[in-house]
Image (tube, helix red, strand yellow):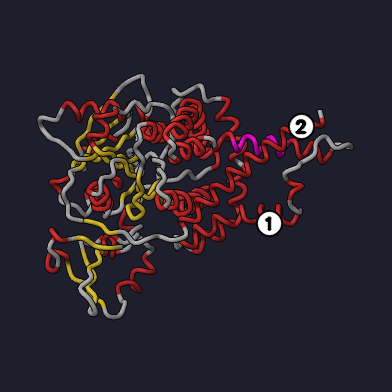
Amino acid sequence: MFYLLTALVAVTEAVVLLVLFYYYYVSIAGWRKHPEEKDYVPVKKFALITAAHNEEAVIKYHLESLKQINYPKDLFDIYVIADNCTDNTAAIARQEGARVYERFSNQRGKGYALEWMFNQLFEMENECTYDAICLFDADNVVSSNFLLEMNSKLKKGYRSIQGYLDTKNPNDSWVTACYATAYWSMNRMWQLARYNRGLSNAMGGTGVCLEYNLLKEFGWGATCLTEDLEFTMKLLLHGIKTSWAHDAHVYDEKPVYFSQTWRQRTRWLQGHWDVAFRYMIPLLKKGIREKKWYPIDGAIYLFQPIAITIMLFNIILGGAHWISPQPIYASPITAMAPNWFWWSFGILGYCYPMLGLILEGAPRKAYFYYLTYPIYGFTWFPVTIWGLLKHSNQTEWAHTKHMRGISISSIESPVNQAPMEVAVTEESDDVVDLSQREARPRRSSSKRRNKPGKHYVPVKDSLDLEKAVVKK
C-alpha cells in the first residue's frame, strides 16, 4: 500500500503542478495591456437580447443602460425574453421600449430560452436582419461604449467576443467583494492574458457578442446549466476562438449571502463537469491531430474541477499521513525542493490575484476585503465535489434572485457617459475617443479631464466618423 500511495501521490502532484505552472505562465501575458488599433465607425447592426425570469426589481435599470449606449439608435434593437415570468418583468420591459417575447415552457433555463429566441429572430429575417447578437442578463448594467467596441471587433473578423465582466455591487458584503476580486483578477490575468497569447477566451454568460451568421451556421444547442461554457467549447471544436474586448464593460450583480454563492457556484460546477465529460477528450484529440495548441488549452480549462478534486484528495491524504504514527506514503515531488520553496509557492498563490487588482486599479476597499479571499477560495473544494455528485442533473433551475437596482450613471464616470467625445492634443493630431476608455471611479475622472495640453470637444464637431480609427 505504501508504494501504491507513493506512486499515486507522485502522479497527482505532478499533474496539479503542471496545470498551476501552465496558468502562471499564461497569466504573465496579462501584465501588460497592449495598444490596439480600433475602428469605431458604426456599421454593424445588433440585436441585444436579455433573458429575464422574474427580474422586475432590476430590469428597468438594465434597459436604461442599453438605451443610453453610445451607438446609432437605428443600428440596434433591444429584445427581452420574459421567461416563465410570474411578476411584472414583461410589463416593465414594454414600458421601457423593449421588444418583449414571453415564453412559457417546461424546458426551463437560460440556454433553452436563448435557443427559442434565436429561432424567433431567424423567422423574422424578412422584416429585419442583424450582423450580430449581444447577450445580457437582466441584472446587468452595460457600459456606454459596449457596442462601439464590439463593432470594432466584428470589423476585424472576430465572430465570437466576450466583454469585460465587472461587478456593480462589490461592497455589499464580503461575498460580493470576493466575487469582485476574483473577476477583476481573472479579467486581467486570465482573459486578457489568453487574448494576448492568441488563445481562446471563455464566454461568461453575459456581455457576449456573437456574429449572426455564426449562430445560423452552427446553431445554438447549448442547453446545459453552463450554456456559455458549452457553446465556447462547441466553437473550439469547429476551430473558432472567442475573442476578448477588455474595454467593453458589463456590470453584474453578485450574490450577497454565502447561501446564494453556494447555490450559484454549485450550478456552475454541475455544468462544468457535464461539459468537461463531453468535450475534454474531443478537444485533446483535435489539438493532437491538427497540431494546434488552442484546443488543448480548452481541454486544460475543462480539466480545472478535476485538478481541484485531485488537490482535495492530496490534502486529505496529507492529513492522514501527518496524524499516522507510521508514514503511509513518500512524496518524491515535494522532496525535490526545500520546504521554504513550497511555502513560498503557497504564499504566491494567495498574493498573486492581488497583482490583478493593482493592474486593474481596484478601489482601496478591495484590499481590505482581500483578507477574506482565502475563505472564498477554499469553499471551491466542497462546491466542486457537490457539483460532481449532481452533474447528471442538468435540468435543475436554481434562479438567483436579484434586488440591487443600480443605474449605469452611478457606476461610470462622466467621461464614459458623455456622447462621443475626443481628446485632441495640442502637440499632435492624434485623436483618442474618451468614450472608449475603461470605466473608472468618479474620483479619477477630474484628474483625467484636467491633463495639461488637452482640450475636449464633441466628436460631431471635430471628427469625421468615416475616419474614426484610433489606437489605444
Cα gap from disc 1 to disc 2, whole angstroms:
26 Å
Decide: marks 1, 2 in contact (CB < 8 A)?
Answer: no
Which tag, 1 or 2, sits closer to the chain's start? 2
Does residue 167 appear anywhere in the picture? no
Identify residue for label 1. Answer: 344
Residue 287 place in picture, x, y as percent = 45, 35
Q: Is residue 54 left or right of residue 226?
A: left
Residue 65 place in picture, x, y as percent = 27, 50
Q: In which quarter of the image is residue 109?
A: top left
Residue 291 place in picture, x, y as percent = 44, 37
Identify which residue, 325 or 415, lies in the foreground.
325
Identify residue for label 2. Answer: 5
* The residue stretch that appears in magenta: 307-316
Residue 181 place in picture, x, y as percent = 50, 53
Reply yes or no: does residue 311 show up in magenta. yes
- Crowdedness near tag 1: few (<14), some (14–19) or many (≥20) residues, C-alpha within 10 Å: few
Identify which residue, 95 or 303, lies in the foreground.
303
Residue 461, compared with residue 12, is above or below; it is: below
Identify which residue, 185 or 113, lies in the foreground.
185
Q: What residue type is labelled 2?
A: Leu
Q: In this view, does 66 lie to the left or right of 384?
A: left
Q: In this view, does 238 lie to the left or right of 298?
A: left
Task: Return the mark for residue 278.
Answer: none
**What secondary structure is the stretch in magenta mostly built from?**
helix
